[in-house]
Structure formats: C-alpha cells, structure tokens
Amino acid sequence: MSRRLHLEIFRYNPLDPDSVPRMQSFYVNEYDSMTLFIALNLIREEQDPGVQFDFCCRAGICGSCGMVINGRPGLACHTQTRDLPDHIVLHPLPVFKLIGDLSVDTGTWFRNVGKRIEAWVHTDDTAFNPADEESRMENALAEQIFELDRCVECGCCIAACGTARMREDFMGAATINRVARFYIDPRDKRSDDDYYDVIGNDEGVFGCMGLLGCEDVCPKKIPLQDQLGIMRRMLALNSVKGILPKGILDRLRHKGCCHEKH
Amino acid sequence: MQIFHTDLLCIGAGLAGERVAVEAAMAGFGVTCLSIVPPRRSHSSAAQGGMQAALGNAVMGKGDSPDVHFADTVKGSDWGCDQEVARIFADTAPIVMREMAHWGVPWNRVVAGTHTYYKGGKPFEAEEAADKHGLIHARAFGGTAKWRTCYTADGTGRAVLNTLDTKCLQYGVSIHDRTQAEALIHDGTRCMGAIVRCLKTGQLMAYLARATLIATGGYGRIYRATTNAVICDGGGQIIALDTGLVPMGNMEAVQFHPTGTVPTDILVTEGCRGDGGTLLDVNGYRFMPDYEPDKAELASRDVVSRRMIEHMRKGFGVPSPYGEHLWLDIRHLGERHITTKLREVYDICTNFLGVDPIHQLIPVRPTHHYSMGGVRVDKSGAAYGLSGLFSAGESACWDMHGFNRLGGNSLAETVVAGSYIGKQVVQFLQGTEVDFSSAAIRNAHSKVAERIARIESNGRSGENCFTLRNAMQDVMMEHVGIFRNEADLTAGVEKLQTLLERSANIGLQAPSRGFTPEMSMALRLPGMLKLALCTAYGALMRTESRGAHTREDYPERNDRDWLNRTLAYWAEGETLPTLKYEDASPYFEIPPGDRGYGGGKIIPADLPPEKLTVPGRPAPHTATPEKQ
Ligand SMILES: Cc1cc2nc3c(=O)[nH]c(=O)nc-3n(C[C@H](O)[C@H](O)[C@H](O)COP(=O)(O)OP(=O)(O)OC[C@H]3O[C@@H](n4cnc5c(N)ncnc54)[C@H](O)[C@@H]3O)c2cc1C
Ligand code: SF4
Ligand code: SF4
Ligand code: FES
C-alpha cells in the first residue's frame, strides 16, 4: 500500500488583502496507518509551513480538528487516509467564522450559545457545606447525564445542519443536547417554563427540520435525534399545560423522560 | 498596542486555570483566562482514568482516609515530595470532589448490592453497602492501597472540565481563547501581567493584572514521543524561566509510560498487561521474562519502560517509518474480552492505528507522559522570585509528586490546588494595589516585538524551526530518556546547547501575514530548548536514582546527598541553567523508607530530630529512623 495521496486544501487568509480563496494541491506518500493529522503535519513541515489547521489532543477527544473531508464534516485526527480515495479534498467547517485555511472559530460560537441558554447547573452555590457528604444520585442517572456531557463541541453537527446554514441564530443540535443535559439533571432547579424561554422557538427546537444530518456526522455518536425529540415533546407539553389535566400531563411527561429507551 | 486590565490573569484554561478563575470570580474579582485553544479543548479533557480523593465510599475503598492517601502519595514520590503540601492535598481532595459534584459533575455513584469486579484479570465479587448507595464511587489505580479514584465512565477529564467551564460562564470569567502569553511584565520584584500574542491576527497585546497565574499544563512536546497534546509546549514555564528570577523545580523528574501507541503516541491502558497482554519484539519473541523473571510485563511502569528501551537498543526493535517500536499482543484475550473489558483500547486501535487488536499486534513504545517538574511555587502557590505570580496544575512544581506521580493524582491536583491556591490568590488580591509601570510594559513588549522582527528578517536564510524542533526531540528521546548515564547526558547537553545557539537564527520558510503557525513554533523553540536543557542538565548533575529518574551509573537512591529538590534558574545569554538545591520537604511526617515496590538500594540520610517532627503535632510522629 504505497499510494501517492493528492490533498486538495482550501486556502484563504482573511487578514491578507492579497489572499483570494482557492484550492491548493499537495502530494504526500501514504504510510501505514496514516491519519489526516499526520498527512497535514507533514505538509506543514515539509511543503508549506503557513497552512492553518487545528489539532490539539490528536486522539479524538478534544474536538479541535473538525473539518469537511471529501464533503462530509468529521474529525481529521481519527480519519485514516486508507479509508479515503487517493484524492482528498479538505474544506473548513461552514457556519463558523473562518480564521484561515481549515481553521474556524468554534470557541466564540459555542460560548455565545452557552450564554444564551445559561449553560450551567442552576443551583445555590452558597448551600455547599464542605463538612457534609455529597448529595446522593442514582448511578444510572449520572451515566445518562454523562452520555450527553460527552459532546466535544467539534461543531460537525452544526456544519452538517441545513437550518444552521440558513439561519445564523439557530442554536443547533449540540446546544439542544446541552439543554437536555441540564434538563435531566436534578441539581438544576430551572422549571419547564424557564427551559421553554430558552429553546421554545425557531432559534431552538422548532427551527429543526429533523433531517438527521447532525446525528449522522457526530463523531461521539451522541443520540442527538432523541434529545431533539425529547425537548420538542417537553416544550409541546408545556404549551398545553393549561389545557390538559395535570395527571395526564405528568404521565406524558414521564414518558418523554430522557432516561428511558424509546 | 491593545491593553486589557484585570484583577487576575489566568494564563491557561485547563482544569487548574479554570478552578482558580472560578474561586477568584466567586469572590467578586475580575478574571481573564488566556488559552491557546477554547478551554474545553485543553489537555485536561484527554484524561480518562479519574482523580484520587479518599472518600472511602466504595467497598474496596473501605477504611480509606486522607492519612492513607497521604502515605501513598509520599511513597509514590519516592520521598522526593514536599510533605506539607502532600498533606494539604490529601486533606482537601475529598471536599473538592464533593464540591465538584455540587457544581454538576456526573460522578459515577455507588450502587448497593453485589457486583463483579476485576483484579489482576481475575473476577471477584464484592458487596457495596446499602448506606453508601448514591455516593461517589471509586475505582482501582496503580500504587494505591485503596480504591480511591473518582471517575465518570472513561471521560473524567471531559466531565470535570465541562463543569468548570460552565462555572466560568456563570461567574462571568472572560475567556480569551486563541491567545498565547509570550512574556511576563515585571519590574524585577513584582509581576504585573503578560504580553500576549493573538493567534488569529498575530498581534501583540498587553494584559495588566494585579495577580498572574501560570496554569499552562505540561511541556511534553520537548520529547518526540509523548502522550501530551500538541499544544503542551511549555509556554508558561518558558515565560517564567525567561525572567531569570523564577526557578523551575525538579525538571529532571519525567514520567514515561510503557505503552504509547505508534505512530500517534496515544496511550493504551496498563489494563492490557494487567489482563494478560504480552510484549513481543521484532522476531515475535516475548522478551520480558528474560529481564524480569518474576513479574515480566507486570513490573512497575518505569521498570517495564526501561527494559523495552534496553531490548530495542540491542537491535530487537521493529523498524517503521515512525521509528522503532515493539509489539503489544492481546490477541489471546479473545474478541469478547477485548470488545468489552478493553473497549477503549479496541476503539483507539481501530480508529487511530487501523489495527484490529483481536487479530493484529499493537505497535507500542515507551512514551513520555507527565512532567513532575515546573514553575517552583511555595505551599500557597506563589512562585519563587516574583511577587504577584502564582502557578497551579501540571505547569507548577507545587511538589506533591516528587520524583514520580501516581495515576489519578495529577487530575486531582489540578482542582485541589486550584481551590486551595485560588483562596490564597483571593487573599493576595484583597491586600494588594499595584502601580503598573509603563517602563516594565514597554520592556516586555519590545523584547517580544524584537524577536518577531528578527525572525521575520532572517526569512528563508534562517534556520528552519521544524528541523531544530525535531532534532531537539530526538536528543531528548535518545539522551534524556528512561535510562540515563553520564556519557549520554553529557553528549545530550552539548547537542542541546548547539541547537540553542542555532535557534537564535531561526527564520521563516513561508511569509508571515497576520498569524502563521510557523511563527508560533519559531517563537516557542528557544524556550523549549531551555526547558530541555534544564531537564538534561539537572539529570546529569543528580547522581542517584529516585522515582522516574534512573541513572544506570548511580543505581541507589541516595538520601544522604540527594534528599533535595533541584532549582534551575536561567540567566540571560547563558547556554546552561544555574542549578541550586533546597530541602525536599520542610519536615518528614513519614521518614524516608522503602517504597515497597521498584526495589533498589537506599543510602540513608542522617536527619536531625526536628526534621522528623510535624509542627504542632506531638509523637508518635516524632519517631527517628533508628527507632523504626
Ligand atoms: C493521555 C493522558 C491521560 C491522562 N490521564 C490522567 C488520569 O486519568 N488521571 C490523572 O490524574 N491524570 C491524568 N493525566 C494527567 C492530567 O491530565 C494533566 O496533568 C492535567 O490535566 C493538567 O491540567 P492543567 O490544568 O494543569 O493543564 P492543561 O489541561 O494542559 O491546560 C493548559 C492550558 O494552558 C493553555 N496554555 C498553554 N500555554 C499557554 C500560553 N503560553 N499562553 C496561554 N495559554 C496557554 C492551554 O491552552 C490550556 O488551556 C493524563 C495525561 C495524559 C496526557
Ligand atoms: S454533538 Fe457531536 S457533532 Fe455536535 S459538537 Fe458535540 S460531539 Fe460534535
Ligand atoms: S435534525 Fe435538526 S439539528 Fe439536526 S441537522 Fe437536521 S435541522 Fe439540524
Ligand atoms: S485533535 Fe483533538 S479531536 Fe482531533
């Protein structure tokens, strides 16, 4: 297996008035178990030290290296070149602000939506008593919360989302997943009404077209569709709160609970 | 030049930086965190195993206490640690873990009833107590007497970092990501902030602060093969060392892990060997029993790493485009075991190596993993040499790890130190005012600006920074690795000195307009070489073997002459650090003794009685070594 790979890389430096967006070709000899991380670093070290791209953990854990690989958003560090044809086309993730070449500003984007949804556990910090034992939690619930907390904010789901590309203010699947994470956490004291205010609109759950692009590309296999469905049901129930009797609502709400398999 | 003002400047937004930031923000101070990457991408997110705190909830942790944790930590350090700090650490850890639970970390919890657990690859049953149901659980880790490591599945670092990051959002901590500190602003006695380079535009900015914290993590990238993230390049240590006033502590203390994968140096867990995996050489021969007839692959981490290198040096390594390696064989464990008990290993192999460990061998080699050394701070986290400067986490030598840190103790250190040192920083801020000297700001700025201008003007005729970096990393692997001896270290130091001289003439291969990654490397490299020299030269001078520091020519742990900590200072214009030494610990709550593993001879110290007395505590802590 000694292919010569043709990597076609998007080049553009927004800070350089002379720079025009273009595709640039590079060629590298493929090694055994080569990843895009290795290929891109070889290009930087041996051919063009100016190419911009982001890697950090290079182990699929930190979420830095999201990019569009042959048309599909994914993490470059755990993409094997052997799984790709010998012509590899790389673009930066859309939706996020371009920093240069393959590098985009996901940090600012995620912090902004984090502020909008107040992405922290709303609890009383002064109530913490260092002498007390911790408040108890069911292990199964802790595992469910972690299942949603595994998101690495790589931005792949946002980049793959039709709505996010059309509406700048759409919060995207990762954000709705994050709301769900706080919603199922008993330490968070926000009410359904509070949550409704946060995502019960077109920028949130109701903007989603349910086409599943997000879940398909999530490198962490986070069950995004389930979370979208659950939040939608919670919100729908909330809006008929005054109409349905409480007993029925509670039963329905329980069914919509994220802890259960659907 | 853009100037920002803040009360506390946290350089670094990993677990340590964010934990200190939250403490100061909760006390009402303005806090700004700098980070090369968005905070959640910090290397802390990569830690999977867990963090130690003596909660004693799990059945296998029964009877645990901060005293036991303290003793494990001191032994782990091979008596190289500061015992006063190790005590603070062990006592504070349980409180901080509970606090993290209050803030939202989904720790795994105790489930009452009978469970099947594994030890040494063999299953056994144990009953979790009903009255502990729902409290924080713990798992086993190396070198600990009890199961003490709190965890969230296989993503502890991720879960804790996410929670701390939400706290920063809640308390209005300003995060300036894609920024890199390049120099400290100081007037010779006091630190006033930092000159920072924007990694989007390449521009320099000044951050003025009443207190400055360095929490930039490790600097594993001075080695070629490291489990550390690509941003772990020692930026924080470098700016402290460059002042000429702040020393680095114990830079020769470097931890290696036997099974980093090749080529990407991602860690596969010790559990592979624990469950019966074996190491093979180029001929498919299992060599470990020849070296270690009793324990074979299950000797301690440093021992296995040493033997692997020895075997490769004899010519039994497997050649590959990424350098020589050996094989880890877990095929005999079978598909079921590998896809359940070692699922993470399975995922890493298939995703990153394109290797199916059920049918194929895993390429591995000993890999740099953790830096015990760093910015030397006292027990309150204050750096030596400059007031207003603090450091916490892996970047610091707070020194609870001494010459070897235990698994699960560094993640715990980040939040324990973050909480404890955070409180000291708050106290400092409450009692301090600063006049920011414009001369100091100008000085620091022009130093960095001149370096940038010089690199730009050298252009293509200057040295290539990637070539120099690769050379440095190879010297560190070859000369300052797991096995050390006078001849290798001397040669290594000389080579590094030459590289340092050459690094004064770095130029750029590609033009720089705005930000370029090449300029980042060019700026960083001379400092990295200095850190490498502190490591190599410190190792050359330390003529004993302690913890992870192994001298073939001095195999004993020599408490008589070396029960101390190395301090490395860097005077401007020099090509070697100036080394000084200080006592390892102000007193010994546990007198130096045998670790109970690792073996080796000890040359005992003759310690005066006051060194064996814990201030404020009577006997039995005043035993002398003779009486024991
Ligand atoms: C693969 C792996 C697994 C591990 N597993 C465990 C484990 O299970 N248990 C355990 O206890 N320990 C573990 N460790 C060790 C532990 O993860 C680290 O020691 C710890 O996370 C370090 O945290 P920190 O906050 O000090 O630094 P980091 O998390 O590394 O954060 C450093 C921060 O500083 C910033 N920074 C760096 N330089 C600059 C600069 N010049 N200017 C501005 N910002 C800068 C970075 O952007 C980052 O935000 C593991 C380590 C590795 C490599
Ligand atoms: S949900 Fe998945 S795809 Fe989206 S940001 Fe998180 S990890 Fe990435
Ligand atoms: S399902 Fe919704 S969030 Fe996911 S990609 Fe489609 S529109 Fe976007
Ligand atoms: S570099 Fe961290 S996920 Fe790819």
Image (cartoon, coloured by chain):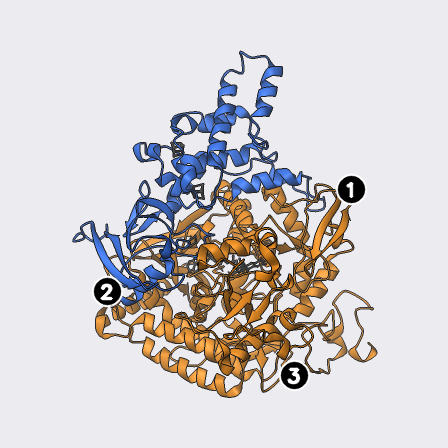
Residue B426 in view here = no
Q: At which x and y percent is residue A80?
A: 39, 55
Relative placement, left or right, of B561 versus B385 is right
Mark 3 and mark 2 in contact? Answer it, CB < 8 Å.
Answer: no
Q: CA distance from mark 1 to mark 2?
A: 65 Å
Relative placement, left or right, of B175 versus B308 is left
Q: Are marks 3 and 1 on the same chain?
A: yes
Q: Quadrant of the N terminus of chain A?
A: bottom left
Q: Earlier in the sequence, mark 3 or mark 1?
A: 1
Relative placement, left or right, of B269 versus B3 is right
Q: Nearer the viewer, residue B426 or B434?
A: B426
Q: Earlier in the sequence, mark 1 or mark 2?
A: 1
Residue B131's disc is: 1
- Chain appearing in blue on the rendered image: A
The crowd level at tag 2 (other Cα within 10 Å; few <14, some 14-19, many 20+) is: some
Q: Amino acid at mark 2?
A: Ala
The residue to which callout 3 is attached is B556
Chain letter for the residue marked with disc 2 in the picture: B
Chain letter for the residue marked with disc 1 in the picture: B
Q: Is residue A172 above or below residue B585?
A: above
- Ligand 1 closer than 8 Å to label 1 CB: no
Relative placement, left or right, of B564 versus B9 is right
Q: Quadrant of the C terminus of chain A?
A: top right
- Ligand 1 closer than 8 Å to label 2 CB: no
Q: Is residue B536 above or below residue A133?
A: below
Q: CA distance from mark 3 to mark 2?
A: 50 Å
The crowd level at tag 3 (other Cα within 10 Å; few <14, some 14-19, many 20+) is: some
Per the image, label 2 sits on a secondary structure element best described as loop
| Ligand 3: quadrant of the figure | top left
Q: Colour of chain B?
A: orange
Q: Nearer the viewer, residue B184 or B80?
A: B80
Q: Are marks 1 and 2 on the same chain?
A: yes
